[in-house]
Image (cartoon, rainbow, N blue to C red):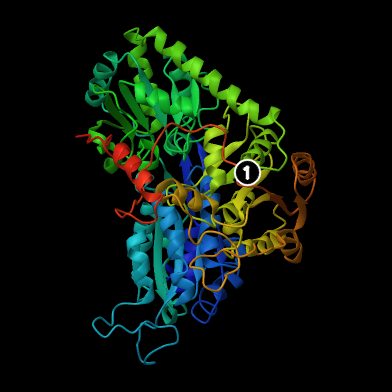
């Protein structure tokens, strides 16, 4: 070994390399990898387990309880750092690795960087078929880790120690590519993890990677300005990219200066908190004033959003015949959606550049457009305020969401994902006064909320309290076990479980699309019945949480809920509030549609009427070219 090399195992070298990477933007420097989540098995216990046990590069270790949940925690951590810092996740091979797939897809769909280090089979193959190995006679080069390929932005399999010298810089580049972020997977063969090699010491030198702001091209900016000058009724769709680029102030100044209404995507929810004409969430579960404005707009400026079908109403929302779409985005793929006029730029720089150009030209949209938007906003806020004024005999899901909102302030963070609760929140949340939202609806992944809240807590970036709102169906998907990790780490957050005995979000879709429900209720099976029609199965969620080491409350009324929310804010460690709710629907609709499957059949009988509605709505679909 020369003085220019250092002998390390491959696992040690990987951790030492990532422990030396730093990220800088606007003069703020953070570690690229803030720690490592892990569950050890025979594939990584003597590889990455050995290296972490030696304290390689002082990377913090967090013991997860579920592989998918560990990735979700890493996503929450990364979101807290606006994608500049994330966590690594190491697992054994076989089921440990395949359990990463859903979390990896959640990260990649949402464009959030996470580093996955699953173990792989023996590179030497001298052992014959190995435990948890996937034998594919047509291709012995395949392993279970290949299931991660389609859900990873970067994938490599390490079969020799020296391969990481080439691989790791490319993996780092993928983690820093915010236009195409997602899961970065380095599958390391279990024998190679422990192999020693004389690595060049230069590989482990501390490096600061500068994330430079991408400024708009002069020509492209001029084209967008020319198009916008013709608009009389423009709106801005603010997506997650606004938050990740730290463009909230630029968005507010742009909107407030020119009087252009802002609607927020699910990922961008609460990024327009200082916007005077913030009309709330847009799309099929959004605020009625946001969707009404979208339907009347003649110009749509989409900033940092993927323009998913939930936002665009499956291309039925923007209905004006002369409507034009423009995009500000780092992703070339997203720039061209809906036939948009593209401006490739960081969201903050794009908005600043556009604002300067329009100021010089003294641009203003139709004054009546501002008045209409403000009137719609006031009517929407009046409807949401009515939820707090009314007293219902039983607690409803939308009352729970409203009370959670009112219990939070600007320094707090609240996590939602696939459930009836996210629909309520997208419709009623007032960004100007309530906590910052983390809404995962790109992959709409049940089970995201609790682990993501843990990730936010571990990041220590949230100044106030952290709350996750989940349905009982989500809570039962095993990720409640991360409460144990929270106890271990001394992490404090509150989990509000809407106890409504089933997957009520899907039940609602079924009823709205075929008139009947099937298979979504937590009820006992009755012999002879096709579905689940017996009495409801009773689960004691509070007792379950206490058994895992968390504090717990059980509430049946708004008064009890508000008391529990106030008390939970004063407790250390994880807290669960089991809120028993009925199935009463939100008292106002969104005014938008979303296309989901509709069977072209004649049975059951209620289906025919719903099928007719489906045909009428689908006829409003537009092609944007």
Query: Which residue is most to the left?
Result: 625
Front-most of 500 and 301? 500
Is residue 517 visible in the rendered structure shown here? yes
What residue do we see at 61% from left, 63% from top?
A: 62
Front-most of 357 and 57? 357
| Element on which disc 1 rests | helix
Location of residue 158 (image quadrant) = bottom left
Front-most of 622 and 122? 622
Is residue 80 visible in the rendered structure shown here? no
Residue 171, compared with residue 8, is above or below; it is above
Residue 523, compared with residue 192, is above or below; it is above
Location of residue 538 (image quadrant) = bottom right
Q: Quadrant of the N terminus?
A: bottom left
Position in image of residue 87 (x %, y %):
52, 57
Mark 1 Cα shell of 10 Å, populated few (<14), some (14-19), many (≥20) = many
Q: Quadrant of the C terminus?
A: top left
Residue 166, compared with residue 178, is above or below; it is below
Position in image of residue 271 (x %, y %):
51, 32
Position in image of residue 147 (x %, y %):
36, 69
What residue do we see at 44% from left, 33% from top?
A: 282
Residue receiving disc 1: 397
Position in image of residue 385 (x %, y %):
64, 26
Residue 563, compared with residue 99, is above or below; it is above
Q: How many marks?
A: 1
- Relative to residue 474, is residue 496 drawn left or right? right
- Relative to residue 207, is residue 365 drawn left or right? left
């Amino acid at each position: 070994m020369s003085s220019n090399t250092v002998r390390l195992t491959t696992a040690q070298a990987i951790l030492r390399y990532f422990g030396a990477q730093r990220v800088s933007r606007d003069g703020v420097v953070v570690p690229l990898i803030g720690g490592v989540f892990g569950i050890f098995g025979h594939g990584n216990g003597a590889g990455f387990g050995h290296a972490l046990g030696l304290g390689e590069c002082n990377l913090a270790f967090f013991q997860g309880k579920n592989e998918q949940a560990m990735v979700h925690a890493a996503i929450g951590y990364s979101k807290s750092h606006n994608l500049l810092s994330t966590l690594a996740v190491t697992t054994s091979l076989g089921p440990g690795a395949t359990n990463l797939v859903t979390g990896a897809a959640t990260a990649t769909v949402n464009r959030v960087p996470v580093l996955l280090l699953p173990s792989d089979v023996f590179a030497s193959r001298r052992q014959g078929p190995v435990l948890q190995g996937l034998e594919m006679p047509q291709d012995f080069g395949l392993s279970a880790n290949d299931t991660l390929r389609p859900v990873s932005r970067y994938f490599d399999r390490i079969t020799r120690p020296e391969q990481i010298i080439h691989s790791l810089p490319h993996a780092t580049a993928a983690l820093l590519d915010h236009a195409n972020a997602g899961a970065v997977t380095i599958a390391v063969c279990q024998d190679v993890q422990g192999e020693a090699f004389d690595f060049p010491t230069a590989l482990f030198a501390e490096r600061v990677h500068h994330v430079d702001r991408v400024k708009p091209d002069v020509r492209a900016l001029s084209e967008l300005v020319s198009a916008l000058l013709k608009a009389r009724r423009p709106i801005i769709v603010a997506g997650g990219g606004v938050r990740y680029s730290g463009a909230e102030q630029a968005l507010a100044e742009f909107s407030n200066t020119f009087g252009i209404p802002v609607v927020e995507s699910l990922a961008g929810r609460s990024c327009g908190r200082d916007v005077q004409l913030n009309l709330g969430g847009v799309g099929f579960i959004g605020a009625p004033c946001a969707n009404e404005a979208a339907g009347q707009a003649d110009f749509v400026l989409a900033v940092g959003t993927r323009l998913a079908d939930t936002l665009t109403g499956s291309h039925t929302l923007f209905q004006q015949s002369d409507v034009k779409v423009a995009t500000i985005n780092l992703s070339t793929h997203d720039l061209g959606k809906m036939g948009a006029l593209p401006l490739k730029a960081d969201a903050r720089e794009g908005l600043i550049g556009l604002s300067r150009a329009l100021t010089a030209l003294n641009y203003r949209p139709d004054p009546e457009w501002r008045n209409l938007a403000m009137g719609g906003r006031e009517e929407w806020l009046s409807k949401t305020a009515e939820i707090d004024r009314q007293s219902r005999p039983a607690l409803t899901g939308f009352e729970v969401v409203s009370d959670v909102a009112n219990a939070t302030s600007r320094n707090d963070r609240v996590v939602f994902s696939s459930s009836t609760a996210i629909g309520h929140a997208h419709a009623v949340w007032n960004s100007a006064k309530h906590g910052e939202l983390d809404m995962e609806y790109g992959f709409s992944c049940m089970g995201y909320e609790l682990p993501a809240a843990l990730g936010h807590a571990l990041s220590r970036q949230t100044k106030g309290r952290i709350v996750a709102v989940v349905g009982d169906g989500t809570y039962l998907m095993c990720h409640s076990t991360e409460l144990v990790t929270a106890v271990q780490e001394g992490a404090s957050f509150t989990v509000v479980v809407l106890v409504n005995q089933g997957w009520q979000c899907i039940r609602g879709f079924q009823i709205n699309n075929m008139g009947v429900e099937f298979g979504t209720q937590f009820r006992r099976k009755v012999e002879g019945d096709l579905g689940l029609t017996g009495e409801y199965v009773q689960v004691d969620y509070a007792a379950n949480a206490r058994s895992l080491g968390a504090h717990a409350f059980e509430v049946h009324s708004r008064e009890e809920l508000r008391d529990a929310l106030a008390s939970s804010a004063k407790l250390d460690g994880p807290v669960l509030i089991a809120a028993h709710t009925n199935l009463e629907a939100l008292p106002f609709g969104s005014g938008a549609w979303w296309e989901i499957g509709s069977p072209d059949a004649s049975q059951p009988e209620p289906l025919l009427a719903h099928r007719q509605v489906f045909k009428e709505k689908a006829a409003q679909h537009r092609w944007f070219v």
